[in-house]
Image (tube, rainbow, N blue to C red):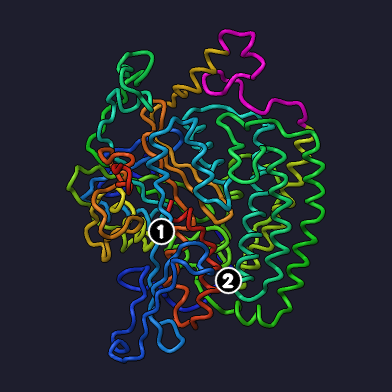
Amino acid sequence: MSVLPSTRIYEGTRIPQPVPTILEVDPEKHRLEDILRVNFGPNHPSTHGVLRLVVDLDGETVAGIRAVIGYLHTGFEKNMEHKSWWKSVTYAPRIDYVSFHANELLYVLAIEKLLGIEVPRRATWTRMAMAELNRIHSHLVWLGTSALELGAISLFWYCFDDRDQILDLFEMAGGTRMHTRYVQVGGIAEDLPPDFTSEARKFCESMPKSVDEYEAILDRNAIWLERTQGVGLLSSDDALALAQSGPMLRSTGVDWDLRRDMPYLAYDEVEFDVPVYCGGDVYDRYRVHMDEMRESVRIVRQCLDRLDEMDGEPWIADDRKVVLPPRHELHTSMESLIHHFKIVTEGFRVPAGEVYVAIESPRGENGCYLVSDGGARPWRVKFRAPSFAALQATATIVQGLLIADLIAAGGSLDPVMGDADR
Amino acid sequence: MTAYASVPGVVETRESFGETTLVVDPARLVEACTALRDEHGFNFLSDIAAADYLGWGEQEVAGYIGTNAGRDIHVPGSQGLARVPPPKPKRFSVSYHLLRVNDDPARLRVQVWLDDGESVASVLPVWPAADWFEREAFDMMGIRFEGHANLMRILMPEDWEGHPLRKDYPLGGEPVRFSDED
């Protein structure tokens, strides 16, 4: 890690004491009658889902804040313990519904680590192309909603237009637009359709132009600049102490990306740059998101080239104890029928042990802690949700802000409440 | 691993699946974590994951799911565990997943074992990020962290009873309105 030299965003630390996630009103001020406690959410259009903020206002200035989560807690982890490994994959993409592919990829990578199964390279490169498309998708949703909150409504429609093209690509490959469950243990569910790479290339042509256009809309817009620059400050030391990751961390000047620093899939074989900015404000988080979209397009292009070379290669491991046999064999082979039946009814077994796997999801470090007892379903599934970690920084970044800036700062954390509450 | 030999309070060091686990005496957890942060550079607390091992290694627990009455799940060979996994020292494990964010990245799992009702010191003074992670472990598993300034429920409502991710907490333990009414 190389922290850029000019990252002294502020002196010392701003993490509140003794509870890092609660900003208490100064007791001196508390005697004043003009401290007003406002309940923000959980049902407010600009809270990115069901986030509740309890804000103490001194005039229009935020004097105290407490984030309350849990309104979207659906017990994913408990439910996954009660499903076979094979079935529980379906739950993973629904946790963070904006970066659905990252979640199912993470969960399957963790199972594969326990199984020690080797994945064909065509599957690896397909997963990587999808992961980057999903990253663009997630950043587009972030950009569209964040700009919408600050009044730029037109950008929302442009972003969702581009997002739709990505969902079309997912639909083409996996049959569903979101929550694709395209990643299977051992590979991917189906091979890519023949015209996928050409369609994806068309998208790769148009996407960088769209990013340029978004920047043209926002970067010379005085309102956008006023409302994002110098707002929501976070220093690199505080970001690391609060376990911030992804764009949050890279906007504070910490040069850290799991794809490059602890590579998984085949990220060590592609060329890409990690955008780092050192302002630590909402504007720099926006810059990181924009640059990451461009870099993702670059990675997708390299993946498509490699996928064209690998045309016709296997896309799922040939391991009959884990992977469903090809459909046509069921009519002619007794063994295949038995394997099919065993996997669908009982599920496959995973060796006993515990692993922690982490990937760079669009929101940062997404981790999965898995415990297996050697049986047909997980003993314990625990997700390290980047949104959950990001929301811990709320009390640190909003200090001294106006209530209107609270929206910009809160949105820049990029929380998805399904991810935070699980 | 000799690399972590100087860490105080280490009871056992395990290597599996390419991951290093340090099992630490719960009484010396904060000491061990401070040493790992200051001397070994683990400046990033990725996650705190608690797990409940009640019923670990018993056949029916990992057996066929959705079992209907009349189906024997104890028949060896068809359902249940093929091989009983080694027993665990206590009921709960709390795993702290540490990450070293610098030019020499590394991951490490620090693990403590607790019985029901036992508590462990909070690592909040070492990594402020532990705040919500510990609250989640308390909410879901009922692990008590001594010295945490705000140990209250985070995902479940404040007046909730029980800890949902414990193995003795049933799936569907939440009462559903009208389900028992005609």
Q: Which residues are magenta?
A: A310-336
> Is A31 placed left or right of B64 in the picture?
left
Q: Residue at x 25, y 31 (%)?
A: B55
Give the vertical position of A25 relative to B88 (above or below).
below
Q: Quadrant of residue A83?
A: top left
Q: Nearer the viewer, residue B99 or B163?
A: B163
The reply to whether label 1 and label 2 mark residues of one chain is: yes
Question: Residue A317's x, y, as percent?
Answer: 61, 24
What element does badge 1 sit on? loop
Question: Residue A135's x, y, as percent?
Answer: 64, 52
- The residue carrying pointer 2 sits among few (fewer than 14), some (14 to 19) or many (20 or more) residues within 10 Å by Cα, namely few
Residue A5 numbered tag: 2
Q: Nearer the viewer, residue A422 or A29?
A: A422
| Quadrant position of the N terminus of chain B in the picture | top left
Kindly identify the amino acid type of the residue bearing the numbered disc 1: Tyr
Q: Residue at x 58, y 73 (%)?
A: A279
Do the CB atoms of the residues marked 1 and 2 lie less than 8 Å apart?
A: no
Please report, as a chain letter, where disc 1 is located.
Answer: A
Q: CA distance from mark 1 to mark 2?
A: 41 Å
> Is A305 placed left or right of A366 in the picture?
right
Tag 2 or tag 1, which sits nearer the N-term? Answer: 2
Give the vertical position of A352 relative to A40 (above or below).
above
Tell me, yes or no, whether the highlighted magenta stretch contains residue A323: yes
Q: Nearer the viewer, mark 1 or mark 2?
A: 1
Residue, disc 1 = A71
